Image (cartoon, rainbow, N blue to C red):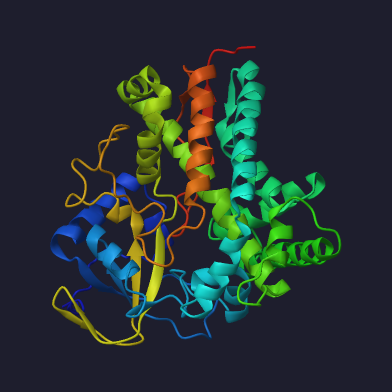
Amino acid sequence: MAAPEAPHSPRVDLGSLEFWGRPAEERDASFAELRRDSPLSRHEPPEDILGLADQELHRYWAIVRHEDIRRISRDPQTFCSGEGTQFGDAPPEILEASQSFLAMDAPRHTKLRGLVSAAFTPRQVARIEEGIRLNAKRIVEEAAPTGGGDFVEMVARRLPLVTISDMIGVPEPDRERIVAAADMLVSVADPEVFGERQPLELLGEALWTLTQFATELAAHREQRPGEDLMTALVQAEVDGERLTHAEIAAFFVLLSVAGNDTTRHTTSHAMRALTVNPHQRAILIDDLEARLPAAVEEFVRWASPVLTFRRTVTREVELHGEQLVPGERVVLFYHSGNRDERAFEEPWRFDVTREPNRHLGFGGGGPHYCLGASLARTQLRSIFYELLRVIPDIEAEPPEMLRSAFIHGVKRMQVSFTARG
């Protein structure tokens, strides 16, 4: 006779890479069951993709409902980020160098976020947003005569790449290798990516590339200021304190990943959604400028580009009749929250006019709400305004997906349209 299952441990293994290789709709059949029957469930440690066998692996509680994710996100005193935010474990030195204030709690989080925010002056933001609009126009104009190709390379990848590079002041010759390194940090679990090499080795190389570049650029900007965010970061000061080069480098790593991958993948998912929902595309095109703001919120909800983050319990707390104790881990499943029937009417209906739309695409609120949310929205509005204005008949084929429990990534996606220009 088989041994009985542990209490509150469903059969589905949310921590296995096989699970994250399934289509989103298939995964959500499991999440829908959990949302209905086991809104708080205990699971074995996630699959160890980095080969950290000598480290202690931790079980975790799965948080799958929209309101629970919001509650936990807004209660950092009970659910902290300082013990790590990634679903799986990684060596402490990699976490320290890559997560910046994402994996910090007050007061250190408050200080660093305040310093970084001080660098985003109104002048900086205005300069960045104008650049986004011009670059979106140029990218679509360059794509228009081709009649199609890989949408990721041709459109989705390009706008975030140039936006972040222009923001920070990354020289043209360095841009591709910086984005490639940022891609590696979130795609290392995919077999196509790591091939015959060890994922941990590739992770270390990518992190070294980004950290070394940022440290050198920060030192250069101290001596030769420019009109870019790196200059603003080295000059930013709050209560007489400035960011160290190590803090700037860690923020640069975070910005390279968050600024590139999330907007890029949302763009691809939204393009596919507009293809398979032609009625919604028609509604959007009918009054493009007025309807884009609401449509962008639906793009982000639909894509849920970040799939998971975790928190650590700091004090006893009750949730769904269970007593959680200090040191236990909770994992927030954002895609599940964005498909929660309790929060959204017909959550699997793609609706560019959906309002209200309290999606979790930029987090559940609280002190770790996405710092770049407004810039992401500007990029999405700008690129889809140009796409649907210049090549409104663009059609996307089914995408090839990244296998990841962190990023809802699109590796490749073919599109076709009437060549113009």
Q: Residue at 59% across / 40% down in the picture?
A: 129
Q: Position of residue 381 (x, y in %)?
A: 48, 34
Up the image or down, 142 lies above or below 259; here it is above
Up the image or down, 281 lies above or below 179; here it is above
- Determine which quarter of the picture holds residue 253: bottom right
Q: Quadrant of the C terminus?
A: top right
Q: Quadrant of the N terminus?
A: bottom left
Comparing 172 with 189, the one in front is 172
Q: Is residue 401 visible?
A: no
Q: Residue at 35% across / 69% down in the picture?
A: 331
Q: Position of residue 287 (x, y in %)?
A: 37, 20
User: In the orientation shown, which residue stands out farthest toward the front?
Assistant: 239
Comparing 329 with 254, the one in front is 254
Up the image or down, 150 lies above or below 112; here it is above
Q: Is residue 80 visible?
A: yes
Q: Residue at 74% across / 63% down in the picture?
A: 214
Q: Position of residue 139 (x, y in %)?
A: 64, 29
Q: Position of residue 156 (x, y in %)?
A: 56, 37
Q: Residue at 41% across / 23% down in the picture?
A: 288
Report the label total.
0
User: In the orientation shown, which residue stands out farthest toward the right?
Assistant: 223
Would you say 25 lies left or right of 308 here? Answer: left
